[in-house]
Amino acid sequence: MITTSELKARVEKEVGTEICPVFFQKAEKYARRKLGLANERAGRKYGEDGYGDEYLVLLTADTVREMAFSEYTLIRSMEIMAARAAQERCVST
């Protein structure tokens, strides 16, 4: 089974950027759990039918992208709401 440091290096290569260790830790935990559940439901062991290290790299990279997009949309939404609130304050005065 691939180590955390090796997985992080391969995922960073896949996504093309360095990943904050805390952010990566969350993504790795989610991806490993998801892969474990998928393997369990399919009745296969880690690595059978291609559902091992290679798939974990892809799954973790996708998880990193999804989490980053989610963070971006949350931040952007907060910026939009703050701008609307500021505009409403200006209009009501």
Image (cartoon, grey):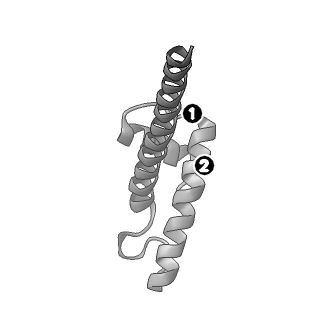
CA separation, marks 1 and 2? Answer: 10 Å
Comparing 47 with 72, the one in front is: 72
Query: Which residue, given by chain and number where applicable, does mark 2 sit on?
Result: 26
Residue at 45 percent across and 38 percent down: it is 73
| 12 sits left or right of 1 in the view | left
Element on which disc 2 rests: helix
Q: Is the Cβ of the residue at disc 1 closer than 8 Å to that at disc 2?
A: no
Q: Position of residue 10 (x, y in %)?
A: 43, 44
Comparing 5 with 18, the one in front is: 18
Query: Which residue, given by chain and number where applicable, does mark 1 sit on?
Result: 20
**Going from the N terminus, do you reach mark 1 or mark 2 first?**
1
Quadrant, the N terminus: bottom right
Q: Look at label 2 and name its amino acid.
A: Lys
Q: Where is residue 26 in the image (x, y as percent from the top left)?
A: 60, 49
User: Can you tell which quarter of the image residue 22 is in?
Assistant: top right
Query: Residue lying furthest bottom in this view?
Result: 43
Which label sits on residue 79? none
| 43 sits left or right of 33 in the view | left
| As drawn, 38 above or below 10 | below
Comparing 9 with 85, the one in front is: 85
Residue at 46 percent across and 31 percent down: it is 76
Count all numbered tags in the image, as a single digit: 2
